[in-house]
Image: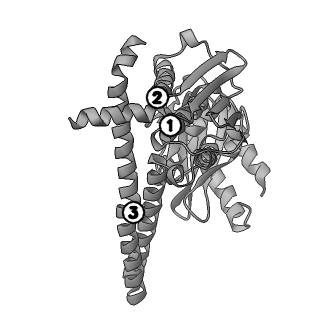
Amino acid sequence: MDDQSIVGECKNLLSEISCDFVGVALQDEKGLNIRWHYAVGNANEKYRLITVRFGKGIAGKVISSGSPIMIEDFPNISYGKPLEQPIMLAENLVSSYAVPLFFNGAPKGVLLVGNRQKHLYTVEDQNKVREAASSLEKILILHFASGGL
Amino acid sequence: MGLLSANQPISSYIIQTQEEEIKRIALELHEGVGQNLYSLYTGLQFIEAGTGQPQLKSYIQEMARLMERTIQEIRLLSVELHPPSLSSLGLLPAIKSYTKLFTSTFGILVEIESKGDERPIAEQSNIAVFRVCQEALANAAKYADTSRISLQFSWDQAEVNIVLKDFGKGFDYDESSPSQSSGLAAMKERMLLAGGTCAISSKIGEGTTIEISLPLRGDSGDQRRAIVDKNSAC
Protein backbone atom coordinates (compact mmCIF):
# COMPACT_ATOMS: atom_id res chain seq x y z
CA MET A 1 0.00 0.00 0.00
CA ASP A 2 1.34 3.44 -0.84
CA ASP A 3 0.34 7.04 -1.42
CA GLN A 4 -0.99 6.11 -4.86
CA SER A 5 -3.72 3.95 -3.32
CA ILE A 6 -4.90 6.89 -1.24
CA VAL A 7 -4.77 9.34 -4.14
CA GLY A 8 -6.51 6.74 -6.32
CA GLU A 9 -9.33 6.43 -3.81
CA CYS A 10 -9.67 10.23 -3.78
CA LYS A 11 -9.74 10.36 -7.59
CA ASN A 12 -12.50 7.73 -7.71
CA LEU A 13 -14.56 9.77 -5.28
CA LEU A 14 -13.95 12.95 -7.29
CA SER A 15 -15.47 11.39 -10.39
CA GLU A 16 -18.21 9.50 -8.58
CA ILE A 17 -19.87 12.47 -6.95
CA SER A 18 -18.87 15.21 -9.41
CA CYS A 19 -17.04 17.36 -6.94
CA ASP A 20 -14.09 19.68 -7.64
CA PHE A 21 -11.83 18.84 -4.71
CA VAL A 22 -11.11 15.89 -2.46
CA GLY A 23 -8.71 16.21 0.47
CA VAL A 24 -7.49 14.01 3.30
CA ALA A 25 -6.33 15.61 6.55
CA LEU A 26 -4.70 13.69 9.39
CA GLN A 27 -3.92 14.55 12.97
CA ASP A 28 -0.21 14.52 13.82
CA GLU A 29 0.88 11.41 15.67
CA LYS A 30 2.37 13.66 18.35
CA GLY A 31 0.48 16.79 19.30
CA LEU A 32 -2.89 18.05 18.21
CA ASN A 33 -2.18 19.71 14.89
CA ILE A 34 -4.01 18.56 11.80
CA ARG A 35 -2.52 18.76 8.30
CA TRP A 36 -3.80 18.15 4.79
CA HIS A 37 -1.70 15.28 3.44
CA TYR A 38 -3.46 14.36 0.20
CA ALA A 39 -5.53 16.33 -2.29
CA VAL A 40 -6.90 15.87 -5.79
CA GLY A 41 -8.55 18.58 -7.88
CA ASN A 42 -6.53 21.13 -5.93
CA ALA A 43 -6.22 24.60 -7.51
CA ASN A 44 -2.86 25.28 -5.86
CA GLU A 45 -0.40 23.81 -3.38
CA LYS A 46 -1.53 25.85 -0.36
CA TYR A 47 -3.12 22.83 1.32
CA ARG A 48 0.37 21.43 1.95
CA LEU A 49 1.23 24.37 4.23
CA ILE A 50 -2.06 24.56 6.11
CA THR A 51 -2.07 23.34 9.69
CA VAL A 52 -5.15 23.60 11.87
CA ARG A 53 -5.50 22.98 15.57
CA PHE A 54 -7.76 20.39 17.14
CA GLY A 55 -11.27 21.86 17.19
CA LYS A 56 -10.44 24.60 14.64
CA GLY A 57 -11.41 24.78 10.98
CA ILE A 58 -13.61 22.22 9.30
CA ALA A 59 -10.97 19.46 9.75
CA GLY A 60 -10.39 20.28 13.42
CA LYS A 61 -14.13 20.38 14.12
CA VAL A 62 -14.79 17.05 12.39
CA ILE A 63 -11.99 15.38 14.38
CA SER A 64 -12.99 16.93 17.72
CA SER A 65 -16.67 16.05 17.27
CA GLY A 66 -16.24 12.75 15.41
CA SER A 67 -19.20 13.76 13.23
CA PRO A 68 -19.61 14.87 9.60
CA ILE A 69 -19.93 18.58 8.77
CA MET A 70 -21.55 20.09 5.70
CA ILE A 71 -21.07 23.67 4.50
CA GLU A 72 -23.59 24.61 1.84
CA ASP A 73 -22.82 28.20 0.90
CA PHE A 74 -19.45 29.51 2.06
CA PRO A 75 -18.79 32.23 3.16
CA ASN A 76 -22.48 33.21 3.48
CA ILE A 77 -23.38 30.21 5.62
CA SER A 78 -20.47 28.83 7.57
CA TYR A 79 -19.27 27.58 10.93
CA GLY A 80 -17.85 30.76 12.49
CA LYS A 81 -15.92 33.39 10.54
CA PRO A 82 -14.68 32.77 6.97
CA LEU A 83 -11.09 33.07 8.22
CA GLU A 84 -11.71 30.04 10.44
CA GLN A 85 -12.11 27.83 7.36
CA PRO A 86 -8.69 28.04 5.66
CA ILE A 87 -9.15 25.10 3.29
CA MET A 88 -12.38 26.65 1.94
CA LEU A 89 -10.51 29.92 1.30
CA ALA A 90 -7.38 28.27 -0.10
CA GLU A 91 -9.32 26.17 -2.61
CA ASN A 92 -12.10 28.69 -3.29
CA LEU A 93 -14.70 26.18 -2.15
CA VAL A 94 -18.32 27.21 -1.76
CA SER A 95 -19.76 23.88 -0.59
CA SER A 96 -18.13 21.00 1.22
CA TYR A 97 -18.90 17.81 3.08
CA ALA A 98 -16.38 16.33 5.50
CA VAL A 99 -16.47 13.03 7.39
CA PRO A 100 -14.16 11.70 10.11
CA LEU A 101 -11.63 8.92 9.54
CA PHE A 102 -11.43 6.59 12.52
CA PHE A 103 -8.34 4.72 13.69
CA ASN A 104 -8.58 2.38 16.68
CA GLY A 105 -12.04 3.79 17.41
CA ALA A 106 -10.93 7.43 17.60
CA PRO A 107 -11.35 10.14 14.94
CA LYS A 108 -7.85 10.96 13.69
CA GLY A 109 -8.46 12.16 10.15
CA VAL A 110 -10.88 13.82 7.76
CA LEU A 111 -12.05 13.13 4.24
CA LEU A 112 -13.43 16.28 2.63
CA VAL A 113 -15.15 16.77 -0.69
CA GLY A 114 -15.73 20.27 -1.99
CA ASN A 115 -17.24 22.22 -4.88
CA ARG A 116 -16.37 25.67 -6.17
CA GLN A 117 -20.02 26.36 -6.99
CA LYS A 118 -22.93 26.10 -4.59
CA HIS A 119 -23.78 22.41 -4.31
CA LEU A 120 -26.11 20.28 -2.25
CA TYR A 121 -24.76 16.86 -1.29
CA THR A 122 -27.52 14.29 -1.60
CA VAL A 123 -27.89 11.35 0.79
CA GLU A 124 -26.43 9.20 -1.98
CA ASP A 125 -23.39 11.51 -2.24
CA GLN A 126 -22.94 11.42 1.52
CA ASN A 127 -23.08 7.62 1.53
CA LYS A 128 -20.43 7.48 -1.20
CA VAL A 129 -18.16 9.76 0.86
CA ARG A 130 -18.66 7.53 3.91
CA GLU A 131 -17.85 4.42 1.84
CA ALA A 132 -14.69 6.07 0.54
CA ALA A 133 -13.79 7.02 4.12
CA SER A 134 -14.08 3.34 5.16
CA SER A 135 -11.78 2.30 2.33
CA LEU A 136 -9.29 5.03 3.25
CA GLU A 137 -9.32 3.97 6.90
CA LYS A 138 -8.23 0.45 5.81
CA ILE A 139 -5.45 1.82 3.60
CA LEU A 140 -4.28 4.40 6.12
CA ILE A 141 -4.15 1.99 9.05
CA LEU A 142 -1.51 -0.01 7.14
CA HIS A 143 0.24 3.25 6.30
CA PHE A 144 0.31 4.20 10.01
CA ALA A 145 1.57 0.73 10.97
CA SER A 146 4.45 0.97 8.48
CA GLY A 147 5.34 4.46 9.73
CA GLY A 148 4.43 5.94 6.35
CA LEU A 149 3.11 9.23 7.72
CA MET B 1 -13.15 63.89 6.28
CA GLY B 2 -14.45 66.75 8.42
CA LEU B 3 -16.52 64.30 10.46
CA LEU B 4 -13.46 62.09 10.92
CA SER B 5 -11.43 65.05 12.18
CA ALA B 6 -14.15 66.00 14.65
CA ASN B 7 -14.46 62.42 15.92
CA GLN B 8 -10.74 61.65 15.94
CA PRO B 9 -10.18 62.08 19.69
CA ILE B 10 -13.20 59.88 20.49
CA SER B 11 -12.23 57.14 17.99
CA SER B 12 -8.66 57.25 19.21
CA TYR B 13 -9.81 56.91 22.82
CA ILE B 14 -12.15 53.98 21.98
CA ILE B 15 -9.41 52.14 20.07
CA GLN B 16 -6.85 52.73 22.82
CA THR B 17 -9.26 51.50 25.49
CA GLN B 18 -10.08 48.43 23.41
CA GLU B 19 -6.41 47.61 22.87
CA GLU B 20 -5.65 48.03 26.57
CA GLU B 21 -8.53 45.69 27.43
CA ILE B 22 -7.39 43.11 24.85
CA LYS B 23 -3.87 43.27 26.28
CA ARG B 24 -5.20 42.89 29.84
CA ILE B 25 -7.28 39.83 28.89
CA ALA B 26 -4.34 38.30 26.98
CA LEU B 27 -2.03 38.80 29.96
CA GLU B 28 -4.60 37.48 32.41
CA LEU B 29 -5.13 34.36 30.27
CA HIS B 30 -1.42 33.73 29.99
CA GLU B 31 -0.22 34.63 33.47
CA GLY B 32 -3.37 33.89 35.49
CA VAL B 33 -5.62 31.19 34.01
CA GLY B 34 -2.76 29.48 32.16
CA GLN B 35 -0.53 29.27 35.22
CA ASN B 36 -3.37 27.96 37.41
CA LEU B 37 -4.17 25.28 34.86
CA TYR B 38 -0.51 24.31 34.75
CA SER B 39 -0.54 23.87 38.54
CA LEU B 40 -3.59 21.63 38.19
CA TYR B 41 -1.86 19.70 35.42
CA THR B 42 1.20 18.96 37.56
CA GLY B 43 -1.15 18.04 40.45
CA LEU B 44 -2.91 15.52 38.19
CA GLN B 45 0.42 13.99 37.22
CA PHE B 46 1.31 13.70 40.91
CA ILE B 47 -2.02 11.98 41.70
CA GLU B 48 -1.62 9.67 38.70
CA ALA B 49 1.84 8.61 39.87
CA GLY B 50 0.49 7.89 43.37
CA THR B 51 -2.51 5.77 42.44
CA GLY B 52 -2.34 2.02 41.99
CA GLN B 53 -5.79 1.55 40.48
CA PRO B 54 -5.45 1.02 36.71
CA GLN B 55 -8.95 2.35 35.95
CA LEU B 56 -8.37 5.53 37.94
CA LYS B 57 -4.89 5.92 36.44
CA SER B 58 -6.30 5.79 32.93
CA TYR B 59 -9.02 8.31 33.83
CA ILE B 60 -6.47 10.72 35.33
CA GLN B 61 -4.26 10.37 32.25
CA GLU B 62 -7.21 11.32 30.06
CA MET B 63 -7.90 14.35 32.28
CA ALA B 64 -4.23 15.36 32.13
CA ARG B 65 -4.29 15.17 28.30
CA LEU B 66 -7.37 17.40 28.21
CA MET B 67 -5.71 19.79 30.63
CA GLU B 68 -2.57 19.90 28.47
CA ARG B 69 -4.71 20.69 25.41
CA THR B 70 -6.53 23.44 27.29
CA ILE B 71 -3.25 25.01 28.46
CA GLN B 72 -2.01 25.06 24.86
CA GLU B 73 -5.29 26.62 23.67
CA ILE B 74 -5.11 29.30 26.36
CA ARG B 75 -1.50 30.11 25.45
CA LEU B 76 -2.29 30.40 21.72
CA LEU B 77 -5.43 32.43 22.34
CA SER B 78 -3.44 34.83 24.48
CA VAL B 79 -0.79 35.29 21.78
CA GLU B 80 -3.46 35.74 19.10
CA LEU B 81 -5.15 38.47 21.15
CA HIS B 82 -2.00 40.45 21.82
CA PRO B 83 1.42 39.27 20.64
CA PRO B 84 3.87 39.63 23.56
CA SER B 85 6.77 40.13 21.12
CA LEU B 86 5.24 43.45 20.01
CA SER B 87 6.04 45.10 23.34
CA SER B 88 9.22 43.17 24.10
CA LEU B 89 10.93 42.88 20.70
CA GLY B 90 9.25 45.45 18.46
CA LEU B 91 7.17 45.63 15.30
CA LEU B 92 9.33 43.66 12.86
CA PRO B 93 9.87 40.55 15.06
CA ALA B 94 6.15 40.59 15.96
CA ILE B 95 5.17 40.74 12.28
CA LYS B 96 7.66 37.97 11.43
CA SER B 97 6.19 35.80 14.18
CA TYR B 98 2.64 36.55 13.02
CA THR B 99 3.42 35.75 9.36
CA LYS B 100 4.67 32.30 10.38
CA LEU B 101 1.29 31.65 11.97
CA PHE B 102 -0.41 33.20 8.92
CA THR B 103 1.44 30.87 6.51
CA SER B 104 0.63 27.78 8.56
CA THR B 105 -3.02 28.84 8.78
CA PHE B 106 -3.74 29.89 5.18
CA GLY B 107 -0.91 28.26 3.23
CA ILE B 108 0.17 31.65 1.84
CA LEU B 109 3.92 32.37 1.88
CA VAL B 110 4.96 35.81 3.12
CA GLU B 111 8.32 37.21 2.02
CA ILE B 112 9.56 39.89 4.40
CA GLU B 113 12.29 42.35 3.53
CA SER B 114 13.52 45.15 5.77
CA LYS B 115 15.78 48.02 4.72
CA GLY B 116 17.42 50.29 7.27
CA ASP B 117 17.66 49.87 11.01
CA GLU B 118 14.46 49.21 12.89
CA ARG B 119 13.63 52.11 15.17
CA PRO B 120 11.50 52.14 18.30
CA ILE B 121 7.85 53.12 17.84
CA ALA B 122 5.48 54.40 20.53
CA GLU B 123 3.35 51.53 21.86
CA GLN B 124 0.00 52.80 20.56
CA SER B 125 1.39 53.47 17.08
CA ASN B 126 3.12 50.09 17.15
CA ILE B 127 -0.13 48.26 17.80
CA ALA B 128 -1.94 50.36 15.17
CA VAL B 129 0.57 49.40 12.45
CA PHE B 130 0.51 45.76 13.59
CA ARG B 131 -3.32 45.62 13.44
CA VAL B 132 -3.39 47.26 9.98
CA CYS B 133 -0.84 44.70 8.70
CA GLN B 134 -2.91 41.92 10.28
CA GLU B 135 -6.06 43.21 8.54
CA ALA B 136 -4.24 43.55 5.21
CA LEU B 137 -2.97 39.97 5.45
CA ALA B 138 -6.42 38.70 6.44
CA ASN B 139 -7.96 40.52 3.47
CA ALA B 140 -5.42 38.88 1.16
CA ALA B 141 -6.32 35.45 2.58
CA LYS B 142 -10.04 36.14 2.15
CA TYR B 143 -10.21 37.86 -1.21
CA ALA B 144 -6.94 37.81 -3.16
CA ASP B 145 -6.72 34.12 -4.16
CA THR B 146 -2.95 34.26 -3.89
CA SER B 147 -0.12 31.95 -2.83
CA ARG B 148 2.42 34.60 -1.86
CA ILE B 149 2.61 38.04 -0.34
CA SER B 150 5.52 40.45 -0.19
CA LEU B 151 5.99 42.72 2.80
CA GLN B 152 8.69 45.40 2.60
CA PHE B 153 9.77 47.60 5.49
CA SER B 154 11.86 50.74 4.92
CA TRP B 155 13.19 52.49 8.01
CA ASP B 156 14.81 55.90 8.15
CA GLN B 157 15.22 58.61 10.76
CA ALA B 158 11.89 60.25 10.02
CA GLU B 159 9.48 57.43 9.21
CA VAL B 160 8.79 53.78 8.53
CA ASN B 161 7.18 52.77 5.25
CA ILE B 162 5.59 49.40 4.76
CA VAL B 163 4.47 48.07 1.37
CA LEU B 164 2.35 44.93 1.20
CA LYS B 165 1.76 43.36 -2.23
CA ASP B 166 -0.48 40.31 -2.57
CA PHE B 167 0.03 39.36 -6.28
CA GLY B 168 -3.59 38.18 -6.24
CA LYS B 169 -6.61 38.71 -8.47
CA GLY B 170 -7.12 42.33 -7.42
CA PHE B 171 -10.45 44.10 -7.19
CA ASP B 172 -12.38 47.16 -8.30
CA TYR B 173 -12.30 49.52 -5.32
CA ASP B 174 -15.70 51.05 -6.22
CA GLU B 175 -17.37 47.65 -6.48
CA SER B 176 -15.89 46.01 -3.39
CA SER B 177 -18.27 44.26 -1.00
CA PRO B 178 -19.53 46.25 2.04
CA SER B 179 -17.49 44.14 4.48
CA GLN B 180 -14.35 44.52 2.35
CA SER B 181 -14.76 48.28 1.87
CA SER B 182 -15.47 48.90 5.57
CA GLY B 183 -12.38 46.84 6.44
CA LEU B 184 -10.28 48.99 4.08
CA ALA B 185 -11.78 52.21 5.46
CA ALA B 186 -11.01 51.03 9.01
CA MET B 187 -7.36 50.42 8.05
CA LYS B 188 -7.05 53.94 6.64
CA GLU B 189 -8.74 55.49 9.66
CA ARG B 190 -6.60 53.53 12.09
CA MET B 191 -3.43 54.80 10.45
CA LEU B 192 -4.75 58.37 10.37
CA LEU B 193 -5.49 58.16 14.11
CA ALA B 194 -1.93 56.92 14.69
CA GLY B 195 -0.61 59.95 12.80
CA GLY B 196 0.29 58.00 9.66
CA THR B 197 -1.25 57.15 6.30
CA CYS B 198 -2.53 54.07 4.53
CA ALA B 199 -2.95 54.02 0.73
CA ILE B 200 -4.69 51.14 -1.01
CA SER B 201 -4.46 50.48 -4.74
CA SER B 202 -5.69 47.50 -6.69
CA LYS B 203 -5.97 46.40 -10.30
CA ILE B 204 -7.91 43.38 -11.49
CA GLY B 205 -5.47 40.65 -12.49
CA GLU B 206 -2.48 42.42 -10.95
CA GLY B 207 -3.22 42.27 -7.23
CA THR B 208 -3.51 44.75 -4.41
CA THR B 209 -0.87 47.00 -2.88
CA ILE B 210 -1.15 48.59 0.55
CA GLU B 211 1.29 51.34 1.49
CA ILE B 212 1.55 52.27 5.13
CA SER B 213 3.58 55.18 6.37
CA LEU B 214 4.20 56.23 9.98
CA PRO B 215 6.28 59.23 11.10
CA LEU B 216 8.75 58.27 13.81
CA ARG B 217 9.22 61.73 15.24
CA GLY B 218 6.62 63.96 16.91
CA ASP B 219 4.10 61.15 17.22
CA SER B 220 0.90 63.13 16.75
CA GLY B 221 -1.19 60.08 17.64
CA ASP B 222 0.32 59.91 21.12
CA GLN B 223 0.03 63.67 21.53
CA ARG B 224 -3.64 63.49 20.58
CA ARG B 225 -4.23 60.62 23.01
CA ALA B 226 -2.55 62.59 25.79
CA ILE B 227 -5.02 65.40 25.12
CA VAL B 228 -7.94 62.94 25.16
CA ASP B 229 -6.71 61.42 28.44
CA LYS B 230 -6.38 64.90 29.93
CA ASN B 231 -9.91 65.84 28.76
CA SER B 232 -11.44 62.60 30.01
CA ALA B 233 -9.84 63.10 33.43
CA CYS B 234 -11.59 66.50 33.75
Q: Residue furthest left?
A: B234
Q: Residue at x 59, y 34 (%)?
A: B137
Q: Which residue is mark 1?
A: B131
The quarter holding residue B116 reads top right
Q: Amino acid at mark 2?
A: Arg
The one of B160 and B11 positioned closer to us in this rendering = B160
Quick check: can you spot residue B109?
A: yes
- Callout 3: residue from which chain? B
Q: Is residue B87 above or below residue B178?
A: below
Q: Residue at x 30, y 37 (%)?
A: B229
The one of A85 and B130 positioned closer to us in this rendering = B130
- Callout 1: residue from which chain? B
Q: Amino acid at mark 3?
A: Glu
Q: Which residue is mark 2?
A: B190
Sequence order check: which comes first, mark 1 or mark 2?
A: 1
Foreground: disc 1 or disc 2 = 2
